Image (cartoon, rainbow, N blue to C red):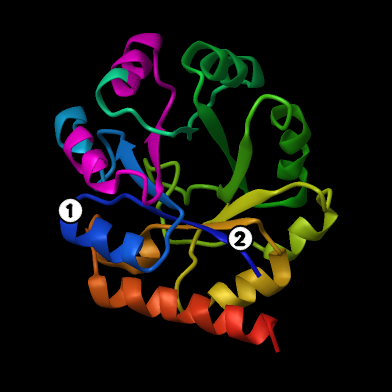
Amino acid sequence: MTLDIKICGLKTPKAIDAVVSRGATHVGFIHFAKSPRHLDIGPMAGLRDLIGTRAEAVVVTVDPDDALIAQLCDEVRPDWLQLHGRETPERVAEIKERTGLKVMKALPVSEAADLSAVEAYRPAADRILLDSKRPKGSALPGGNGVSFDWTLLARLDPKLSYMLSGGIDADNVAEAVRIARPGGIDISSGVESAPGVKDIVRIHAFFDALDEIAVAANL
């Protein structure tokens, strides 16, 4: 079993080294001022240099304007832009064409009807990320540490390779993979000791759980 693994909201060299050494395929940086995982562009660019070609760098933004996109591309040089706001399919396609980068579009899910948006965004985005809808009162479009009913995803086109996010950690990642069969897992709060504070022990526990999944799949 091959899964893309994205660890998001990284802010320190130590955390980056931990996730990359364990085989993360994608490293996510967040540029959204309301998030406890927010990074300014200067520090983000410095951390991006530490990744090199060991993993793909993803910058997560929320409804970015053209000026911000240009600055992120010029200074951070990400491999991916992840759009986590209310961007339309047309806006997603425009950003992809403008930057030449791969684009991931996050879609919030809480009920079956929410999955109807997938087909509209599928032609525009390189990948879809399915995340839990924000809880009432939260200002964050993601990273809230809550999951949704993964059995809803059985109705998706089995050819759709998407990433799954929302409330995943070392304890439930095997269940998430078994039920949803995603092409990738995106995790942030599930490897934190506090909002925005990555925990190296939890990072290793998460990757240990992934190793167990891989071993079981080969039996």
- Where does the magenta region start and end? 45-73
Residue 148, numbered circle: 2
> How many other residues sit within 10 Å of disc 2, few (<14), some (14-19) or many (≥20)?
some
Q: Amino acid at mark 1?
A: Thr
Picture coordinates of residue 198 (x, y %)? 25, 63
Circle 1 residue: 12
Residue drawn at x 68%, y 81% as measured from the top left:
217
Residue 173 placement, left or right of 46: right
The residue furthest front is 53
Query: Visible in this render: residue 39?
Result: no
Picture coordinates of residue 175 (x, y %)? 63, 77
Q: Nearer the viewer, residue 98 or 137?
A: 98
What secondary structure is found at the residue carrying circle 2? loop
> How many other residues sit within 10 Å of disc 1, few (<14), some (14-19) or many (≥20)?
few
- The total number of labels drawn is 2
Q: Amino acid at mark 2?
A: Phe
Residue 170 placement, left or right of 123: left
Residue drawn at x 21%, y 29% as measured from the top left:
41
First in sequence: mark 2 vs mark 1: 1
In the rendered image, residue 58 lying in the magenta stretch gets the answer yes
In the rendered image, residue 55 lying in the magenta stretch gets the answer yes
Give the Cα separation between the discs numbered 2 and 1: 29 Å
Q: Nearer the viewer, residue 6 or 149?
A: 6
Picture coordinates of residue 52 (x, y %)? 30, 43
